[in-house]
Amino acid sequence: MEDEEKKKPFTNVFQKLKNILRRMSKKKRAEDEAARLAAEEEARLAEEEAKKAAEEEERRILEEQARKAAEEQAEVERLMKETEAAKEAKAKREAEAKAKKEKEAKKKAAAKKAEAVKKVASGEVGTKEDQEKDKKYQEEVKRRAEQAARRAQQDAEEEAAEDASIDPVTGEKISTDDGLDLPVYLNKYLKLAKTGDDIKVAISSIQTHPETSKNLVILGHNGFGTVKVGEDLARSYFDLGFVSSDKIAKIKAKQLNKIGLEKLSGLKGGCLIIENAGLVSPDKLVEVIRDSNKDANDYVVVLTGEIDSLARFFEQNQEIVDEFVYLIDIHKIKERGMSIIAKGYVKEKGYKADKVIFDRFKSALGSMEVGNIDRFLEFIDNVMKKCDDREASNGETGKKVLSTEDF
């Protein structure tokens, strides 16, 4: 570790990782809130549907009762007609009087039930109360939606401010468009919005502050799968004159924990790439940092890994956080980003391919881990090798036109 008087950078990788985690947490809370609101709305609609179904059932029952009442009345009238001829006039008058009385009573009951059905059908029952409840609910939904929108806007503004081209050494805006002559093999990453900006900021800052630590962290979707990115950046360090040797050593964290640093003695002036760095023991990484100093073996340390393990690692190792100023963020890469890399890689290697070929590459992603750039580029390398073999056997060596036969 260099002396304690060394000027601290404006920010470091650990601070950036904490900001990313904070935004991810906010996004999760917003998604949970949206899901809760959706569940409430679904429950409300279900309650309304159940209420309507109950009202419909009540209406059906009332109509059925009215129908039965009418049938019963018709039956009474039929019986009355059958007994009229057989009964004496007095019995007839008594029966008629009784029937009339029963008829009137049933008519009143049927009319009352029909009126109740009418009220239910017309929406008079409970309408005012339901409308008031619905109004209050809609107002609450609107208020929460506006609150969520304000939070999302605030997060977007914070992320935009952080993602601006800020020099992590000084905290000032840094130019990434002028005077940057980058190696061609970095082009495949530059069209990835966040990743491309991170690469340009890091290189521009190192050119401006050559005395600052050049160590960097590559933040991937997994703890593995971004070593190729580290290799390309390590190559660029040599091609741009940031390091004196083109030697690149790659090692997994668990393997590094088991070896002595004398194994790295031949790396002087080059770069060491540590895969899944969140699993490196704290003491071992402190040793590596000391060994990589200019007055020792003088090499650059590149850490690759996923956000949770790296954030936890830096939190537990505060004494080395300022040794890592530059962060290359590629952890959100999805299918579209992988396709961009594929197109850039094919062009970089001098091959030609049409949409059918790139669709084949995209389909191959389904059998790979999300964000595993190493495995994806290895797959493309194998396709290129088959292309070379096919063209050589056909006497067309050097055409470099990828075909579906190469898959």
Image: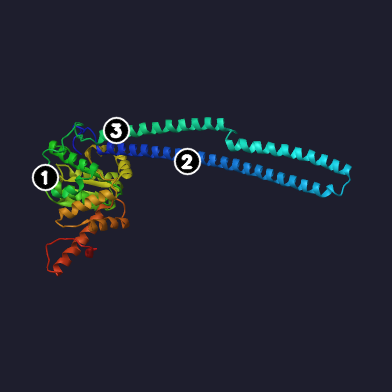
Residue drawn at 49 percent across, 32 percent down: 137
**Which residue is label 1 attached to?**
240
Residue drawn at 83 percent across, 48 percent down: 83
Q: In the picture shown, does residue 230 fall above or below 386?
A: above
Q: Distance between the residues labelled 3 and 2?
A: 30 Å
Would residue 259 be visible to someone looking at this image?
no
Q: Which of marks 2 and 1 is in front?
A: 2
* Image position, residue 81 (x, y; %): 80, 48
Query: The residue under label 1 is which amino acid type?
Result: Leu
Question: Of residues 367 and 146, which is closer to you in this image?
Answer: 146
Question: Of residues 383 and 234, which is closer to you in this image?
Answer: 383
**Which residue is label 2 attached to?**
39
Q: Distance between the residues labelled 3 and 1?
A: 33 Å
Q: Quadrant of residue 315?
A: top left
* Residue 185 relative to residue 148: left or right: left
Q: Looking at the rendering, in which quadrant would you find the N terminus?
A: top left
* Image position, residue 174 (x, y; %): 17, 34
- Which label number is shown at residue 158? 3
Query: The residue under label 3 is which amino acid type?
Result: Glu
Colour approach in the figure: rainbow
Question: Of residues 132 and 364, which is closer to you in this image?
Answer: 132
